Image (cartoon, helix red, strand yellow):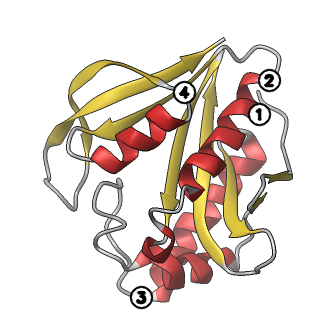
Amino acid sequence: MLPPATELETERLRLCLPVQDDARRIYDAYGTDLEVTRFLSWQPYKTPEQAEPRMRQRLEDLASGRELSWVIRRREEPELIGLVSLFPADHHAELGYVLARPHWGQGLVPEAARAVSDWALAQPGIYRVWAVTDQDNHGSARVLEKIGMQCEGKLRRFAVHPNVSPEPRDCWVYAKVV
């Protein structure tokens, strides 16, 4: 089990543990955006209340060690702009991330994802950080390549992205190992 990291900082970002009030901030920042949620495993929220149970579950998973998540903020601003997560298991951890659309194209996701993956790989017993991305999510594939992950191949019919199709889709798997 990875130790909790309460805060990570990069040149431009502050990554902090989420709190229940962040459910509304996620709703406001990107939770209703069809383009942001296109390749995620959940559908956009229709009401702020729909974000509440997911945040409660995330906080339970954080407390149990099944997940480590950080909300993404610019260092000098209080606004939540995204989220980056790790899902540890045995000697590896899966990486996931999301960023509000007004902040796309500025190198913020690679900056946050690199900080989290580097932190994870520095922990004793973690030898692999990996991620999957839908075969059509070229932006996410570029993020993974920018942070030093290598494409290991295609996982056929691997993940359902309900905003694209109700059926499992092919995904690329990327990893960085030490």
Badge 4 amino acid:
Gly
Residue drawn at (70%, 69%) of the image: 73
Q: Residues within 10 Å of mark 2 (few under 14, many from 20)?
A: few
Residue 96 in picture, x, y percent from top left? 51, 45
Vertically, is 164 above or below 100? above
Q: Secondary structure at mark 4?
A: loop
Q: Residues within 10 Å of mark 4 (few under 14, many from 20)?
A: some
Residue 77 in picture, x, y percent from top left? 76, 79
Name the quadrant containing residue 24. Answer: bottom right
User: What residue would you read off at disc 4?
Assistant: 148
Q: Secondary structure at mark 1?
A: helix
Residue drawn at (46%, 43%) of the image: 143
- The mark that comes first in sequence, 4 or 3, is 3
User: What residue would you read off at disc 1?
Assistant: 119
Whole-number angstrom distance, CA of label 2 to CA of label 3: 39 Å
Whole-number angstrom distance, CA of label 1 to CA of label 3: 35 Å
Front residue of 80/164: it is 80
User: What residue would you read off at disc 3?
Assistant: 47
Q: Residues within 10 Å of mark 3 (few under 14, many from 20)?
A: few
